[in-house]
Amino acid sequence: MIDFNIILFDDFETLDAFGPAEIIGIVPEIYKLDYFSLHGKTVTSSQNIRVTTKPFSDMNPEGVLLIPGGMGTRALVNDADFIHELNTIAHKAAFVLTVCTGSALLAKTGMLDGRPATSNKMAFEWVQSVNTKVDWVKHARWVADGNCYTSSGVSAGMDMTLGFVGDIHGQDIAKRIADDIEYIWNSNKNFDPFAL
């Protein structure tokens, strides 16, 4: 069983987190889902969904880490304690996946320095400004580089998560999951109709 740890914070984008959670939840024989925030508390999404989380200190960080985006990332990129702790757990994770502006948080740790990555296209300039050492890719639905996967905005996180599952566990499993949730999967990571 592989731990699939989703980081949440106030004003996270609901689909950024729960789109991938829906996909991963289809294969409980492979992954165990759990939800974390820095100190462990009830956090509220931008759509007013409240989620009770565990503190980072309770996390087994050696699984998969998913970082959603949302308006809450704007404050968190300047939260030194959060970035320090994120840096610690991200470097221990087998894989790190980001959705939307979650890539800005990972970029702030330095883990994406010199690596290709993408983000929400409507917030692309802001994300670029967070760390100019990243090789930001404008035209990508998602980018896979080693153990880091970064996706464009919101629904792109579902495409990326299916792509991750396909890369690690085989395309047949990814396609089965997409069928199970009746989702039309954009399986071409380079096809980005929302690129600016």
Image (spheres, grey):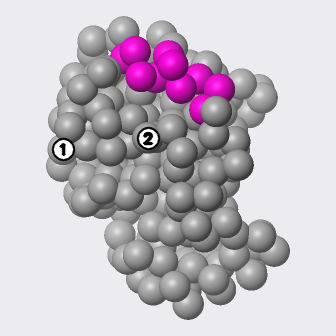
Q: Is residue 20 visible?
A: no
For residue 105, above or below residue 18: above
Please tell me whether residue 51 belongs to the stretch shown in magenta. Answer: no
For residue 12, above or below residue 6: above
Any mark on residue 137, and which? 2
Q: Earlier in the sequence, mark 2 or mark 1?
A: 1
Left/right of residue 152 with respect to residue 194 in the rendered view: left
Query: Percent from the top left, x then y, of residue 141?
Result: 57, 52
Q: Quadrant of residue 32?
A: bottom left
Any mark on residue 65, and which? none
Write down the region rendered in magenta: 121-130
Q: As shown in the figure, which amino acid type bears the numbered disc 1?
A: His
| Cα distance in 3D space between marks 2 and 1 | 22 Å
**In-front residue for pair 47/193:** 193
Query: Percent from the top left, x then y, of residue 170?
Result: 45, 86
Q: Quadrant of residue 51?
A: top right
Q: Residue at x 25, y 59 (%)?
A: 146
The quarter of the rendered structure image containing the C terminus is top right
CB under 8 Å between callouts 2 and 1?
Answer: no
The crowd level at tag 1 (other Cα within 10 Å; few <14, some 14-19, many 20+) is some
At mark 1, the secondary structure is helix
Q: Mark 1 highlights which residue?
A: 91
At mark 2, the secondary structure is loop
**In-front residue for pair 128/2:** 128
Query: Percent from the top left, x then y, of residue 39?
Result: 38, 25
The quarter of the rendered structure image containing the N terminus is bottom left
Query: Percent from the top left, x then y, of residue 153?
Result: 63, 40
Main SS of the magenta segment? helix
Q: As shown in the figure, which amino acid type bears the numbered disc 2?
A: Val
Q: Residue at x 48, y 10 (%)?
A: 75
Q: Residue at x 31, y 21 (%)?
A: 131
Name the mark nearer the viewer: 2 or 1. 2
